[in-house]
Image (cartoon, rainbow, N blue to C red):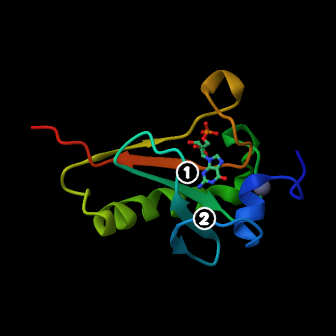
């Protein structure tokens, strides 16, 4: 899929609305349109990368930045201390439907 047709590229370019929780120089985050948890945020690089399989050596700091952003967003959402999950789905067999790299942040369950 080209960047022109990519749904997350369209969101990043402002051509399609999204509920943003972060707009950084290299990374954005927005709420998942069909949340699978009370808090479900997608952490997305502005650079169009298909999946984890397509990362290059030069993307090392980008992927680190994505992961390091997660606790900040979790804190803002009030779920850092209660806990959360981070997930990369990789390719169709791994449950990936949108082929623009993204890190899922899930949390907010009432677990005792
Ligand atoms: P994947 O299965 O590819 O790892 O996850 C893609 C996620 O993107 C899904 O959880 C899906 O609900 C979400 N998603 C798909 N299209 C849109 C959209 O247009 N806007 C937003 N905010 N989320 C989307
Ligand atoms: Zn894209």
The N terminus: image quadrant: top right
Query: Mark number for residue 33?
Result: 1
Ligand 1 under 8 Å from disc 1 Cβ: yes
* Tag count: 2
Residue 47 seen in the figure: no
Residue shown at the point (25%, 48%) measured from the top left: 83
Lower position in the chain sequence, tag 2 or tag 1: 2
Q: Which residue is mark 2?
A: 18
Give the side of residue 5 with respect to residue 104, left or right.
right
Q: Decide: few, some or many residues near mark 2? Use Cα within 10 Å; few <14, some 14-19, many ≥20.
A: some
Residue nearest the viewer, comparing 25 with 30:
30
**Residue at far left of view:** 112
**Residue at far top of view:** 93
Is 11 above or below relative to 49?
below
Q: Quadrant of residue 70?
A: bottom left
Q: Position of residue 67 (x, y in %)?
A: 47, 56
Ligand 1 under 8 Å from disc 2 Cβ: yes
Q: Are marks 2 and 1 in contact (CB under 8 Å)?
A: yes
């Amino acid at each position: 899929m080209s960047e022109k047709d990519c749904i997350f590229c369209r969101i990043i370019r402002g051509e399609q609305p999204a509920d943003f929780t972060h707009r950084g120089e290299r990374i954005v985050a927005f709420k998942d349109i069909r949340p699978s948890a009370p808090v479900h945020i997608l952490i997305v690089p502005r650079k169009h990368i298909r999946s984890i399989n397509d990362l290059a050596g030069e993307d090392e700091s980008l992927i680190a930045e994505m992961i390091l952003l997660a606790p900040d967003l979790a804190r803002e959402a009030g779920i850092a201390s209660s806990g959360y999950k981070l997930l990369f789905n990789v390719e169709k067999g791994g449950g990936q439907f949108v082929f623009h790299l993204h890190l899922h942040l899930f949390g907010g369950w009432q677990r005792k």
